[in-house]
Image (cartoon, rainbow, N blue to C red):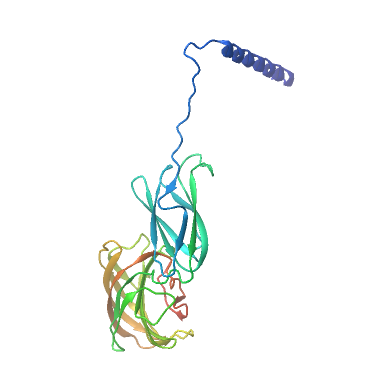
Amino acid sequence: MKLHTLFNSLVFSVLLVGLVMLTASCKKDDNGPTSTTPTPTPTIGITGPDVNISFASGAGATSRVITGGTPPYAITMPPSGAVATAVLSSGTNHDTLTITPIAAGTDSFQITDSAVPNVAGTGNSVIIHITVATGGGVGSYGSGTVTAISVAGNLSFTGAGVWPAGAGPSVIAVYDTVLHELVLLGYQQVSGSNYNFAELAILMPTGVAAGTYTENSGAASFVVGYNIDTSNTGTTEYEAVSGSIIVGAPSGTNVSGTYSGQAAIGGGTPIDFSGSFNVAYVRGRSPIGGAPNRVYGKVNEKSPAK
């Protein structure tokens, strides 16, 4: 079609539409004027006083329920992880949001529903602000008992998770939601910066689950230290060279199990180790997670393969 013909057709169409609209507006409606108000999409919401969540010094994890909008939901702008972590777990027509304080500071993150199209500022998302007081996160890293038995000495630690490390005894039990591993650490101060400790790391890509996890497959590791100076990067702790960790069926956030194998200092002669754990773990970022600097951020330890 030529350009001028197309233009003339458009003009005729506009005039025709205008005539139809004028005729319709002049036609009497015997039933009176009517209007239709679209049903609004439920706004995504969060339980609790508001979206400003504060943690006092020593506070542990807290949970909120996300409802409204169009589930399922997603954390589309996650927190940095330095101040706090956030994890969503699905439910029926709602999700549970768990926030774990890590260190003092402020942060924020966004939760968005699954509406299509998804338009910011229309109730499809909510921004949550976090404030963690100085010392926040201390005491929020699980609790329980971790033991180690060997000819080098028997260790047993029972307590609530405290970080940064105090005198102890303390047991940290965290399922690291970024590294996808269960990290268990029992420690107690000997003197100054010297500590006894026993740590286990178990790679669990789909969450905490029962099973046998082996060192050889890269799914498990344990380290035991006797009177270790944590102020330097010495490698005088016993690192697993073989063995396995057996995890029983979890009950909520409680899990127990045993481990056994051989561990050596550096390239020295391995000795036999065994032990057990019975803990209540939290979900979030482990303060000691992340090879190669795991125990106290100082001791160079083997880690399960990622």
User: Which residue is pictured at 50% across the width and 59% down the height?
Assistant: 79
Residue closer to the observer: 92 or 4: 92
Question: Relative to residue 257, is residue 77 depicted above or below?
Answer: above
User: Which residue is pictured at 40% across the width and 71% down the height?
Assistant: 304
User: As drawn, which residue projects farthest toward the front?
Assistant: 49
Quadrant assignment, res 203: bottom left
User: Which residue is pictured at 42% across the width and 72% down the height?
Assistant: 138
Quadrant assignment, res 208: bottom left
Q: Give the percent coordinates (x, y) of residue 26.
A: 58, 11
Q: Give the percent coordinates (x, y) of residue 232.
A: 49, 85
User: Which residue is pictured at 39% across the width and 66% down the height?
Assistant: 60
Q: Is residue 201 visible?
A: no
Question: Relative to residue 7, is residue 128 depicted above or below?
Answer: below
Q: Is residue 262 visible?
A: yes
Q: State how many labels appear.
A: 0
Residue closer to the observer: 160 or 151: 160
Residue closer to the observer: 36 or 228: 36
Q: Quadrant of the C terminus?
A: bottom left
Question: Relative to residue 75, is residue 166 depicted above or below?
Answer: below
Q: Quadrant of the N terminus?
A: top right
Q: Give the percent coordinates (x, y) of residue 119.
A: 53, 42
Q: Give the percent coordinates (x, y) of residue 84.
A: 46, 63
